[in-house]
Image: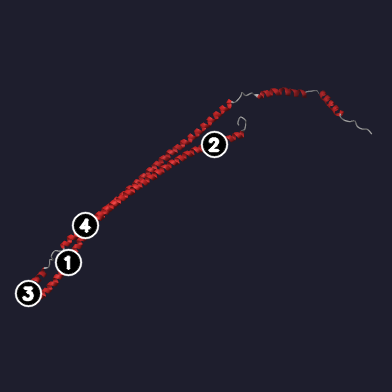
Amino acid sequence: ALERQEFKLAHHAKEMSVSLTAREETRRLQAINDRHGSEQQGVQEAHMMQAMEFNSAWSTNMSEFEKQALEIEERLKAKHAAEFAAFQEQLSSQTQRAYKFSRELLQLKKAMETLAKQGKYDKAHELKQKAEQLEQWERMKLDNDLKTHIATKELQLRQQQQLQLDALRRRIQRGREEHKEHWLLGAQRLMQSHRNMLADLKTKQALENVRADVAVKLDLASSRAGHARAKSRTNYSDAKPRVDTRRQDASNDTPRASTLSTSRTLSPSSSQANSRANSRQSHSGRLPPIRS
């Protein structure tokens, strides 16, 4: 187009070349961006799988921990129940012992027996009534004291067992909190590892984008240059030797110009003769006027 001086066509061809080059560059860069997005998505999916496996493992671990803690607590409760039953049995055996009455009651009984031997039955009967009342009161007092003693012992044993159970529950709670802390630390480490991996991948991809941009431009420039060289070789292979036609035109125009100049330099007499001849020819074709 440039050789034929078709500049509009050349301009249009240049615009099409620039547009096609831009499209090709955009296509290649978009392909790289798509691949980078696919790589990042793969990293995200891998992280999600690792997180799911991590949480599943720790959930199983916590379930096993809770199961073991419940078993330990149940064993301790069963042990406490057996200890309490044995303690109650031991206390019940202690309640079968003889009552230990007071000295006053013993003296009343002795005096009653003495009066009965002496035949003083009325006074003996009075002492008997007093002794029975005093014995009933002392029995009640001893029973109450024994019950209070048993209740106190049972309460002490219950408190001791409750302290043991609370201490076990505190240990279980500490273990539970430690497990949760390890779980949280592991999750944070996994998340940080994922962030570092994703940051490294993005850094590598950014560097690859810069290099790819330069490489695509160089590749397209080299392809255009190679195409231009191939086209020039094709055009010049069919070309013939060029002849300078301007000199021939100038040589052909020289006699014509000399002829014109010669005709212009003719004498006036020749020009007048030519004019008279022309006028005679014109009048010879006319009819003479008619006279009346």
How far is disc 2 from disc 4 in space, using C-alphas?
92 Å
Looking at the picture, tell me which residue is in the foreground, 136 or 271: 136
How far is disc 3 from disc 1 in space, using C-alphas?
31 Å
Residue type at numbered disc 2: Leu
Residue type at numbered disc 4: Ala
Q: Is there a contact, CB below 8 Å, between mark 1 and mark 2?
A: no
> Which residue carries the number 1 mark?
143
Looking at the picture, tell me which residue is in the foreground, 122 or 14: 122
Residue beneath the point at 61% across and 33% down: 7
Q: Secondary structure at mark 2?
A: helix
The residue carrying pointer 1 sits among few (fewer than 14), some (14 to 19) or many (20 or more) residues within 10 Å by Cα, namely: some
Residue 111 at x, y = what percent? 8, 72
Give the number of the disc on residue 20: 2
Residue type at numbered disc 3: Ala
Give the number of the disc on residue 82: 4
Residue type at numbered disc 1: Asp
Residue 179 at x, y = what percent? 31, 49
